[in-house]
Amino acid sequence: MSEPKTASNTPVVLSVHDLVVDYGRGARKTRAVDGMAFEVREGECVGFVGPNGAGKSTTIKAIMGFLFPTSGTVTVFGEAAGTVASRERIGYLPEVALYYPFMKARELLELYGGLHKMGRASLATRIPELLAEVGLGGKEEVLLRNFSKGMQQRLGIAQAIISDPELLIFDELSSGLDPIGRYDLRQVLLKLKAKGRTIFFSSHELTEVEDLCDRVLIVHKGRCIEEKEIGELLHPLNRFTIRFSLPSGRAPEDLAETTAFTQEGDSRFRCEIVGAEEYATILKNLTTAGATIHEARSEQVSLEKYFMNLIQSRDGATGHIAAHSES
Amino acid sequence: MRSIWLIAKSVLIEAIRRKEIYVIVLVAVSVILLTGMVKFFGYQGMSKFYREISLKIMNLATALAVVVLAARQLPREFENRTIYPLLAKPVGRLPFLAGKFLGVMLAGLFCYSMFVILFLAGMWHLEISLSWVLFLEGVYLQVLALLVIASLSFMLSLLFNIDAAITVSVLIFALGGTVSSAIDYIHDHVKDFGRVTETLSIGDLFMRALNFGIPQLSLFDLSGKVVHATDISNTASGLAEITRWQGVEPWVLGALTLYSGAFVLLYLGLAHLMFMRRPL
């Protein structure tokens, strides 16, 4: 019987080892990436987050072969980064890119698809489908100089996935997209994820990373400082909130002596509880007392708060993990 | 090969849609048309004047178009970041360069062929005769010159900015012969000094290298011969057309093909060396 595929036993698709990238020479030399190391396995969706200047785009450029590492190695599907063989299986969306303004959307996708060795017949069917998928249906014959920034970004996504690549690398995933564009993009990515495609993207939109990714890599000052499964990171805090109403004549203090209750209306109360046992006890007491429970929820750490806390602690600033409520 | 063709096609599409080529052709054609209207030289003078002005303008305007197109290709790719999605596809940097260069040449040939058609239409309209062999040889040599100047402009665009690449390329195209004479003159002086002090022999070598590094594009210009190839002369039986120049010897064409090929390989090779390890 074959072993079920999990992140740890699927093949490594992307591997970055001790990557160092310097810009400039001599006195003007700046180290943009300083010992970056991580792996991405087949079928994973990995978010690459970090503050501006952390080295995200530089690392992605090294993966694509646009930059040459000062030291360290980058391999994609076992091939050295930047080789034609490695790029055959990648779909890439750059952070900022304009597309040839004097070409039509169809011509541009024919060019990119052609470079992926796609035939004319397959391109003829693929291009309208793809444009419809990214919300540009019917724009095949429109010159790109007439495309808005958001439309260009959508076209960028289309060019990245035209050959249905096994690995997708997006630098600043939803940059330039409006909320509808972001929603559409998320649907496209969810489809690709469901098809088992490997997705690696950088983003400043941490809720996007939370929603889409299996794993997150947090980078700071050119290094990967944290690597966590999203489920592990967004663990429930041992904190709970209950909102309830009591029948007339009952006081909440009768239910639990040690818990503080806040009155929110005539007979409406709120309490915040630490500890699962205490939470279970109060819920039981409330039910017994005939209370109407309006809301009972546990609180979780959000990626945003986790990220802020981690970066602040690394920078030496005082910070604390603040809880973010999730229903 | 398909990658090269696809990239070349994108350059050609852009060149055709940008309409800059048409502006160059329109201005040049306007000048040629004005030339055709000048009749006070008489038939013989007018035919020579038309041929001379037309051929000079055709060559210069096409060279200008090719230089501008070649100089823009790579810097614009970097500026607009269009290079990222393109080089993220399975295409090497060498095929990318080759595609860009082929595209520039195709656009140049498109421009030149428009000129040739208009020139021949003018000749036919004005009933001016032409030495076809010399004319076709001149067209061939002009294409070789365009290859050289495009590769030079391409290489310079990686070394300098667009404006500098265009300026230097146009100067070499238009004044290559003069620059070469000046270098010869300086070289002779350096050599004279070199006899006195050994250390200046590096300067001597530098001047030689510079002289050989600049292509002598005047060698590719047959317009003078095409203009004066035929003439009207008084003979015993009256006015008759006489042929002054025959076609160029095949070995000369062969030698010039090799000469231009060497420069194209040199400039494109240098461009590849600069581009191969360039961080994007």
Image (cartoon, rainbow, N blue to C red):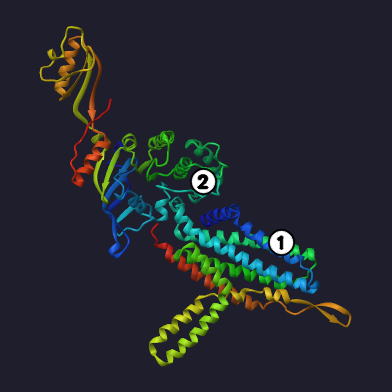
The mark total stands at 2
Q: Residue pushed farthest right?
A: B237
Is the residue marked by circle 1 packed among few (<14), some (14-19), or many (20+) residues within 10 Å? some
Q: Nearer the viewer, residue B167 or A238?
A: B167
Q: Residue pushed farthest left?
A: A257
Residue type (three-letter) at the residue carrying disc 1: Leu
Residue B95 visible (yes or no): no
The circle drawn on residue B242 is none
B272 to the left or right of A235? right
Q: Chain of mark 2?
A: A
User: Which residue does the image show at 62% across and 74% down from the upper left?
Assistant: B220
Q: Looking at the picture, how far across and down is residue A78, in whole percent?
A: 34, 52
- Quarter holding the N terminus of chain A? top left
In this rendering, is residue A118 above or below B171? Answer: above
Q: Looking at the picture, how far across and down is residue B15, in whole percent?
A: 58, 55
Q: Nearer the viewer, residue A119 or A246?
A: A246
How far separated are the C-alphas under marks 1 and 2? 36 Å
Find disc 1 in the rendering and name its residue.
B118
Q: Nearer the viewer, residue B164 or A35?
A: B164
Residue type (three-letter) at the residue carrying disc 2: Leu
Q: Nearer the viewer, residue B247 or A297?
A: A297
Q: Secondary structure at mark 1?
A: helix
A303 to the left or right of B21? left
User: Which residue does the image show at 23% across and 35% down from the upper left?
Assistant: A232
In this rendering, is residue B190 above or below B138? Answer: below
Q: Secondary structure at mark 2?
A: helix
The circle drawn on residue A109 is 2
In front of the other: label 1 or label 2? 1
